[in-house]
Amino acid sequence: MADDWKRDHANASEEAAKHGLVDDVLSEFADNMGFRRDGLPEYGLQKIVMTVAQVVRARTLGFDPELLRLTADEARAQSLAKARIAVAAGKPVLRIEGDDVTMLD
């Protein structure tokens, strides 16, 4: 998993992203563009808002936002953790590593 400081930073950024002003602007934008705020469009909007919130917060705190990127080991650990949750929920999960494909159970 990502370092605790990265998780803490994301959580604090999320609080800013939940502000009513942000929600109002997103709703106005969706209305102007003619789409509903659900599904993939909503996911995309939230991803943009969270990324901006994290970058702005990093700069405000005086550190390089590039430090927020996951290392290869962190990304692998997060992917495997999500796969374990899916397997525990009875969902079929394939692990693909190079040319090797394995069903996780």
Image: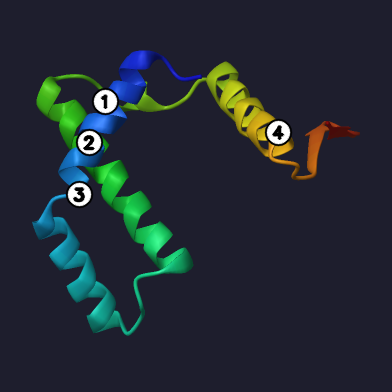
Q: Amino acid at mark 1?
A: His
Give whichever of 51, 4 is nearer the camera. 4
Identity, as a three-letter code, of the amino acid under mark 4:
Ala
Quarter assignment of residue 23:
bottom left
> What whole-number distance in Å separates the C-alpha atoms at marks 2 and 4?
30 Å
The residue located at (20%, 27%) in the rendering is 58
The image's colour scheme reads rainbow
Distance CA(mark 1)–CA(mark 4): 28 Å
* Residue drawn at x 61%, y 26% as measured from the top left: 81
Q: Which SS class for mark 1? A: helix
* Viewer-side label of 3, 4: 4
Disc 2 + disc 1, Cβ < 8 Å: yes
Q: Are marks 3 and 2 in contact (CB under 8 Å)?
A: no
Q: Nearer the viewer, mark 1 or mark 4?
A: 4
Counting residues from the N terminus, which is met first, the one under dot 1 or under dot 3? 1
Q: Residues within 10 Å of mark 3 (few under 14, many from 20)?
A: few
Say whether disc 3 or disc 2 marks the residue closer to the N-terminus.
2
- Kind of residue at disc 2: Ser
Residue indicated by mark 1: 9
**Label 2 crowd (10 A; few <14 / some 14-19 / many >=20):** many
Name the disc covering residue 18, or none. Answer: 3
Residue tagged by mark 2? 13
Name the outermost residue toward the front: 89
